[in-house]
Image (cartoon, helix red, strand yellow):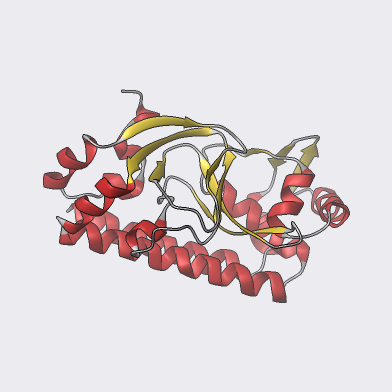
Amino acid sequence: MPHTLSPDSNNLLSALPVQDKVRWHSHLVPVELQSGQVLHETGCVVPYAYFPTTAIVSSIYPMENGATVEVAEVGREGFVGVSLVLGGDTAISRAVVRKQGYALRICGVHLRRQLDDSVVASHLFLRYIQAYIMHATQAAACARLHSLEQQFCSWLLSTLDRQHDNKIFITQEQIANLLGVRRKRVTLSALKIQDAGLISYTRGCIVVMDRTGLENQCCECYAVVKRGYDTVLAALQNAQV
């Protein structure tokens, strides 16, 4: 099996107790996710959970007027389908693939059974969900209190943490939809960040030139969310000992 499709390429799956892994792996199906693919819709039944290995998935909250905003994102650190673990059958947000790549999929029924059979696995998933909820909460505060340039820098850094290179393939229209603002504001912000020498932007592709500079320009929200996920990662690594 290619490394990108190995369960160990996802932090949560990799941290499962050895005695649980055989049971889990028999239910995991490797899938390739396409950019823009909707994994589940708000208010609809969630049939599967997804564990990204190279893909990145956005949790999107849509409004009645058609506006959208990203409330969290999921990469190899976690999984898509938190409502399955929290006891709900329907999604509280739309899950859309933002970066094409691979993931491992498991039926919601099997996910619940595996967690019911393992106290350790259940605890690990709840620790991750705590960080995920903190991520969504921080995003709401960030959108209300910080400048678009700060939000943009934080978003770029968060995306870099979930991939292996410094190129982000995305359009300004897509960024505007994720940040919940007009495209013109994204254009102006991208130009300011580019003029500062932090990124190079061409149509559909952002290349991060100065990560340290982005860290100096972003708001505190990036560090807060990163600490939350780092704490979970440390717990996952300890669980393997």
Direction left: furthest residue: 19
- Toward which corner of the image does residue 4 lie, by quadrant? top left
| Picture residue at 44% right of the left edge, 52% below the top | 45
User: 194 left or right of 38?
Assistant: right
Residue 62 spot, x, y in % from top left: 66, 59
In this rendering, the answer to whether 199 lies above or below 178 is above
User: 18 left or right of 51?
Assistant: left
| Picture residue at 43% right of the left edge, 65% below the top | 131
| Picture residue at 77% right of the left edge, 64% below the top | 148
- Toward which corner of the image does residue 222 lie, by quadrant? bottom right
Dividing the image into 4 quarters, which one contains the N terminus? top left
| Picture residue at 85% right of the left edge, 50% below the top | 187
Identify which residue, 220 or 92, lies in the foreground. 92
Residue 130 spot, x, y in % from top left: 39, 68
Residue 117 spot, x, y in % from top left: 14, 55
User: 157 left or right of 26?
Assistant: right
Direction top: furthest residue: 1
User: 106 left or right of 215?
Assistant: left
Disc tally is 0
In this rendering, the answer to whether 84 lies above or below 172 is below
Residue 177 spot, x, y in % from top left: 73, 53
- Toward which corner of the image does residue 84 lie, by quadrant? bottom left
Identify which residue, 41 or 49, lies in the foreground. 41
